[in-house]
Image (spheres, helix red, strand yellow):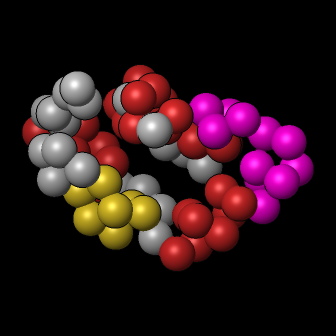
Amino acid sequence: MKKPFTPKEIKELKKSPYVTRVSNTSITYSKTFKEEFIRLYQEGLTPTEIFKELGLAPDIVGYQRISG
């Protein structure tokens, strides 16, 4: 089960230009994020590396969400 975000984590996630919406249980990513994710994945980066590269901390997002 995915852990809910704390108010502090929500505030941090909302700062990202790659996040269009965040609630205590979900994140909606921007079209730009999705395009960058695909490009970087095709270049050989792992999903965790991509999140780090794009400024989204895996320890906040959650590894289950990243690999899910």
Q: Where is residue 54 in the image (x, y as percent from the top left)?
A: 61, 49
Return the residue nearer the eye: 52 or 12.
52
Q: Where is residue 50 in the image (x, y as percent from the top left)?
A: 66, 43
Q: Is the magenta stretch mostly helix, strand or loop?
A: helix
Residue at screen point 41% across, 29% down: 64
On the picture, is 54 further left or further right than 14? right
Q: Is residue 9 above or below residue 18?
A: above
On the picture, is 50 further left or further right than 19? right
Q: For the image shown, how many numbered marks are present on the structure?
A: 0
Give the position of the N terminus as an image quadrant. Answer: top left
Return the residue nearer the eye: 9 or 23.
23
Q: Is residue 45 above or below residue 17?
A: above
Query: Residue 14: which quarter of the image?
Result: bottom left
Q: Where is residue 32 in the image (x, y as percent from the top left)?
A: 58, 72
On the picture, is 8 further left or further right than 38? left
Return the residue nearer the eye: 64 or 18.
64
Q: Is residue 12 visible?
A: yes
Q: Give the range drawn in magenta.
A: 39-49
Q: Position of residue 49 (x, y in %)?
A: 68, 34
Quick check: is 54 in the magenta stretch?
no
Residue farthest to the right, as pictured: 43
Q: Is residue 11 visible?
A: no
Residue at screen point 52% across, 34% down: 67
